[in-house]
């Protein structure tokens, strides 16, 4: 029996766990005992290749195919076209730069500051600008303007951009704010003054035990704008004996930024940590923080809104003065809460369109109360369409869209990585969008995803003309001279 001959020959061949070309020839000799290889013998040989194919040397495999006269087994069917997520990139034509956010606050009232991080510093960019103005016989005042207390507006006086302390205290109001509240012409120690309300915002609550952290206050929006409008300064510049480092020049461009580039495009609602609202049927509105746990899923009169019909029998709210109050459903018109999330469809489409226009733009990446402006220049998307779903996605999310629950449109799940300029790293966003008739009509965020607070960009390029309200001593034409020397 030739099948037996084939098997015995195979056993011999398999002893060293490898099948060589010579051994293949012996297999075929064994199969060929009757002068021809019968169908059964062919099938046996094909089975050997299938079972032991990995043990065949390359030459053995080639010889096997040649001797069998045809492919021993049908070629494997091409893999069924698997539905893959789609990758899309939107990218601006140039990368923005950034630098420190130039904090307004100093330490313990010392106004010397640090030249590389405080615009108002003794050796800082504006002090040097004053030296240049002086050398050219022009009026100085740039640093002094900057050093005016940023909170002078609290007493209707001209404000600058300086705060003596990163923590404001009502108990030591003048020293921490730099504001002469009692109007005696000097800054006094331990003046108690009511300028912070029970919600931690500027205002009054009849008490002087409030405090506020302002260490994060600075010019990050202006830095972001400068990083888009101007090229990054490459080297130091000496003019009339005054040396401007690249960091000094970045500081001057920061001070100049708002006066250049025209108006701004602005998308999204800035989150302001507004108190929750109870609107009564009698028209009265009461503010505070809901104690009753409420499920906000629809938008209405004010951000997230629940109309009285959908409310529990009673709603309890903690008022700004700390007391709690309970309202009956029958008294209520609606309750509302400020939305911390913007429309993902609006964010998605704006980021794509702005980057596709070639220019970088800016986002506040902190969806909470703080504002951290970052330039962004690239978005890498992975789009899961046609029933595809990433691991993080679930149907619960579809119930909480910006415009209410998703309905019967096509759902795209999006993973978007936005690249931020100047060492800001990347932000990762996860959301869904619902498409109807070729348009996205609704969307929602993965509750664990970050989301940008708002987006903006200057509308035009810098012209170095006009006035500079941010600091009127910083003349655009003179900054242009320094800047252009630094990028040559
Ligand atoms: Ca005083
Ligand atoms: Ca107070
Ligand atoms: Ca924010
Ligand atoms: Ca927002």
Image (cartoon, helix red, strand yellow):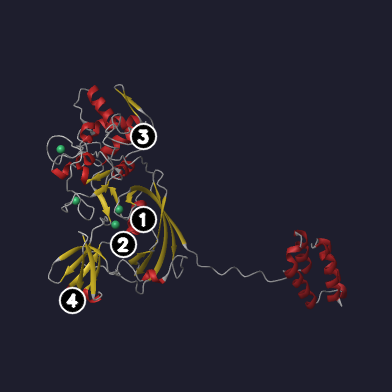
Q: Are marks 2 and 3 in contact (CB under 8 Å)?
A: no
From the viewer's perspective, is the residue at label 4 or at label 1 nearer? Answer: 4
Residue under the image location 12 percent in, 39 percent down = 183
In the image, is 82 to the left or to the right of 175? right
Mark 4 Cα-neighbour bin, 10 Å: few <14, some 14–19, many ≥20: few
The tag earlier along the polypeptide, 2 or 3, is 3
Q: Which residue is mark 3?
A: 233
Image position, residue 93 (x, y; %): 39, 46
The tag earlier along the polypeptide, 1 or 2, is 2
Q: Are marks 4 and 1 in contact (CB under 8 Å)?
A: no
Mark 3 Cα-neighbour bin, 10 Å: few <14, some 14–19, many ≥20: many
Q: Which mark is residue 352?
A: 1
**Residue 359 at least partly seen:** no
Q: Secondary structure at mark 4?
A: helix
Q: Secondary structure at mark 3?
A: loop
Residue under the image location 20 percent in, 34 percent down = 145
- 482 or 100, which is in the foreground? 100
* Residue 131: quadrant of the picture: top left
* Residue 311: quadrant of the picture: bottom left
Mark 1 Cα-neighbour bin, 10 Å: few <14, some 14–19, many ≥20: many
Q: Which residue is mark 4?
A: 330
The tag earlier along the polypeptide, 1 or 3, is 3
Q: CA distance from mark 3 to mark 4?
A: 64 Å
* Residue 339: quadrant of the picture: bottom left
Q: Which residue is mark 2?
A: 343
In the image, is 92 to the left or to the right of 126? right
């Amino acid at each position: 029996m030739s099948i037996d001959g084939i098997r015995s020959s195979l056993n011999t061949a398999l002893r060293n766990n490898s099948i060589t070309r010579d051994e293949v020839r012996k297999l075929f000799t064994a199969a060929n005992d009757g002068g021809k290889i019968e169908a059964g013998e062919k099938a046996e040989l094909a089975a050997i290749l299938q079972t032991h194919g990995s043990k065949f040397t390359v030459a053995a495999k080639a010889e096997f195919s040649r001797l069998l006269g045809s492919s021993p087994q049908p070629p494997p069917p091409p893999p069924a076209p698997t539905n893959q997520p789609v990758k899309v990139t939107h990218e601006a034509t140039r990368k923005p730069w950034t630098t420190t956010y130039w904090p307004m606050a100093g330490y313990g009232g010392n106004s010397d500051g640090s030249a590389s991080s405080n615009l108002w510093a003794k050796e800082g960019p504006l002090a040097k600008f004053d030296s240049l103005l002086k050398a050219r016989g022009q009026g100085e005042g740039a640093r002094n303007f900057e050093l005016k207390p940023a909170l002078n507006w609290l007493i209707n006086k001209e404000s600058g951009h300086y705060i003596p302390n990163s923590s404001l205290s009502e108990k030591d109001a003048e020293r921490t704010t730099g504001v002469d509240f009692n109007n005696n012409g000097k800054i006094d120690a331990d003046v108690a003054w009511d300028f912070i309300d029970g919600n931690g915002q500027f205002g009054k609550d009849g008490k002087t035990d409030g405090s506020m952290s302002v260490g994060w206050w600075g010019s990050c929006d202006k830095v972001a704008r400068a990083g888009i409008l101007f090229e990054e300064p490459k080297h130091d510049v000496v003019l009339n004996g005054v040396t401007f480092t690249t960091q000094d020049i970045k500081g001057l461009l920061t001070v100049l930024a708002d006066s250049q580039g025209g108006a701004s495009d602005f998308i999204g609602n800035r989150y302001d940590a507004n108190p929750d609202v109870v609107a009564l049927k009698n028209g009265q509105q009461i503010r505070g923080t809901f104690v009753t746990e409420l499920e906000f899923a629809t938008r209405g009169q004010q951000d997230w809104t629940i109309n009285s019909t959908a409310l529990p029998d009673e709603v309890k709210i903690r008022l700004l003065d700390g007391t709690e109050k309970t309202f009956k459903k029958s008294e209520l018109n609606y309750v509302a809460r400020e939305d911390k999330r913007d429309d993902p469809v609006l964010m998605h489409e704006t980021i794509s369109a702005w980057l596709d226009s070639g220019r970088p733009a800016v986002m506040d990446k902190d969806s909470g109360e703080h504002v951290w402006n970052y330039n962004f220049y690239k978005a890498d998307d992975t789009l899961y369409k046609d029933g595809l779903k990433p691991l993080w996605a679930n149907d619960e999310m579809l119930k909480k869209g910006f415009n209410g629950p998703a309905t019967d449109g096509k759902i795209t799940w999006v993973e978007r990585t936005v690249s931020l300029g100047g060492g800001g790293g990347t932000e990762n966003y996860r959301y869904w969008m619902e498409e109807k008739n070729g348009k996205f009509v609704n969307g929602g965020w993965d509750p664990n995803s970050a989301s940008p607070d708002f987006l903006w960009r200057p509308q035009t390029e810098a012209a170095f003309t006009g006035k500079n309200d941010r600091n009127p001593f910083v003349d655009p034409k003179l900054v242009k001279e320094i800047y252009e020397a630094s990028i040559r």
